[in-house]
């Protein structure tokens, strides 16, 4: 069994089987960050900071709201080791979910492996005039001047000027994703994934396509020849058994 499992390393990263879940041990991880609802103030005009029942921050005036999760299942993708991040001058499509980072890999890529990811999701500001990403001035000198009255435009412009990046002066919010390849939180070997975790109809690799996986996929001709082989084997055994019975009876 171990030899067969080790054969999988030509297509599956070790971490895929040995990190079955992440954010374990009572330590949740942030899974959602929504900047679009930032700016709420208390009745006396002060910034707000709230925490959930477990004591983790779920709202900050100048950052928005957060969600947390524990014992989460990774999401899986083909990954060849190269990640590219969106640049401030790259055009984006604000009508869809924008991937902050992109990576390459496929079944046919000899350098790619199926890898586990944490996917961070959220909403963040962007430049509506240029259809580009922006960064904001949250810390450092004069930060209070931007956030005392919560002025997004001033905060964005200050940060973009510091980066020598163009800003149209008009902002909006888009939904984004950010992929984190998982390499920490390796579980004890007894907790590593077994065959049934993936080789099943509702297995973990259900979203990966372009290859055949026994136990998950059905191909008509493969299934047909497989069942014919099974029936042929069963028929051969039956005929052999019947022949032995007849020959024994004749000898008597």
Image: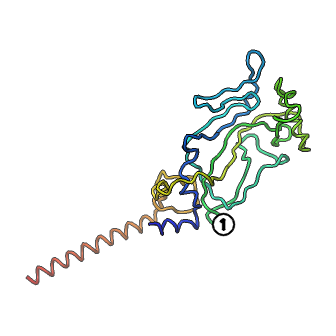
Could you tell whether 32 is left or right of 233 in the image? right
Total numbered labels: 1
Q: Residues within 10 Å of mark 1 (few under 14, many from 20)?
A: some
Above or below, 17 relative to 73: below
Q: How is the image coloured?
A: rainbow
Could you tell whether 191 is left or right of 151 in the image? left
The front one of 32 and 182 is 182
Above or below, 229 relative to 50: below
The front one of 248 and 119 is 119
Above or below, 118 relative to 225: above
Residue indicated by mark 1:
111
**Quarter that holds the N terminus:** bottom left
SS under mark 1: loop
The front one of 102 and 230 is 102
**Quarter that holds the C terminus:** bottom left
User: Going 79% across and 34% down the picture, which residue do you hit?
Assistant: 172
Could you tell whether 236 is left or right of 102 in the image? left
Residue 197: x and y, percent? Answer: 48, 54
Residue 151: x and y, percent? Answer: 84, 27
Q: Quadrant of residue 251?
A: bottom left
> Most extreme residue toward the left, as rendered?
252
The front one of 249 and 10 is 10
Residue 58: x and y, percent? Answer: 65, 31
Residue 5: x and y, percent? Answer: 49, 65
User: Going 87% across and 38% down the picture, which residue do you hit?
Assistant: 159
């Amino acid at each position: 069994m171990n030899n067969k499992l080790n054969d999988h390393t030509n297509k599956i990263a070790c971490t895929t089987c040995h990190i079955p879940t992440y954010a374990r041990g009572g330590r949740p991880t942030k899974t959602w960050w929504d900047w679009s609802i930032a700016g709420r103030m208390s009745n006396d005009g002060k910034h707000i900071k709230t925490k959930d029942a477990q004591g983790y921050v779920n709202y900050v005036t100048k950052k928005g709201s957060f969600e947390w999760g524990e014992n989460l299942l990774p999401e899986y993708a083909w990954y060849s080791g190269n990640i590219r991040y969106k640049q401030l001058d790259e055009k984006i499509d604000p009508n869809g979910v924008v991937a902050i980072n992109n990576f390459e890999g496929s079944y046919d890529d000899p350098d790619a492996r199926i890898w586990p990811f944490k996917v961070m999701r959220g909403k963040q500001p962007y430049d509506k005039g240029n259809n580009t990403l922006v960064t904001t001035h949250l810390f450092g000198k004069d930060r209070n001047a931007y956030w005392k009255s919560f002025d997004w435009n001033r905060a964005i412009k200050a940060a973009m000027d510091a980066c020598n990046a163009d800003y149209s002066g008009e902002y909006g919010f888009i939904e984004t994703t950010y992929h984190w390849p998982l390499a920490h939180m390796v579980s004890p070997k007894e907790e590593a994934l077994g065959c049934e975790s993936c080789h099943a109809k509702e297995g973990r690799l259900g979203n990966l396509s372009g290859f055949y996986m026994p136990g998950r996929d059905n191909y008509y001709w493969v299934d047909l020849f497989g069942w014919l082989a099974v029936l042929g084997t069963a028929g051969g055994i039956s005929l052999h058994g019947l022949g032995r019975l007849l020959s024994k009876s004749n000898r008597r």
